[in-house]
Amino acid sequence: MKICAVELRSNEAIICMLNKNSGMIDIPDCRTQKFIIKDSLDNQEMRDFQFAFKKLLDDYQVDQVVIRTRETRGKFAGSAIGFKLESAIQLIDGLDVQFISTAEIKQSLKRNPLAIDFRSTGLRQFQEAAFTTAFAQLS
């Protein structure tokens, strides 16, 4: 099963793909690590984001997308642009989108801790939250 984890930060959708095959987890190469939206009020830019995201998932034959949830209120609340990006992802036809909270991720990592240090994965530092989200979903 190949999944794409998404962490939404302000106007960015940071992604990390993981593949689980016969109990082994590997990190496939991916042509992009994040999508950036400059103007969320521009309809064409939002459509372009949705098209580019769907094309990436089709090209890499991703089975499921998992989005790390954010608070809707308070100090750690997600931005309005982030929620728009979340909706654009959810509305892609034929896509299996799941959500996982930070608490669920922590519980999953407690049951199945990471066997390797994040720095040895070859991913960029800003992808760490997306990586842990994908790992928790596959565990």
Image (spheres, grey):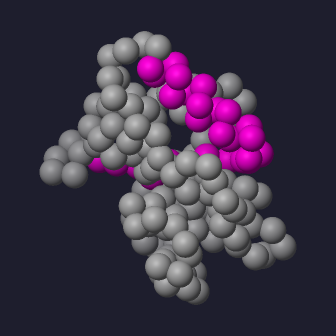
Residue 40 sits above or below residue 59 on the image: above
Chain part drawn in magenta: 45-71
Q: Quadrant of residue 43?
A: top left
In the image, farthest residue toward the left: 75
Q: Position of residue 107 (x, y in %)?
A: 46, 73
Q: Nearer the viewer, residue 43 or 23?
A: 43
Most extreme residue toward the right is 22
- Residue 49 on the magenta span: yes
Residue 2 x/y as whole percent: 72, 56
Q: Can residue 123 be seen here?
A: yes
Considering only vertical position in the picture, is 70 above or below 89? below
**Residue at x-position 67% and y-position 33%:** 55
52 over 129 or under it: above or below: above
Could you say where residue 119 lies in the image, as x and y percent from the top left? 47, 79
| Identity of the residue furthest to the front in this view | 31
Q: Please provide percent x and percent y for residue 42.
A: 37, 15
User: In the image, what residue occupies the spot 74% across and 66% down?
Assistant: 20
Name the residue furthest top. Answer: 43
- Residue 111 in view, yes or no: no
Image quarter of the N terminus: bottom right
- Left or right: residue 74 versus residue 23 is left
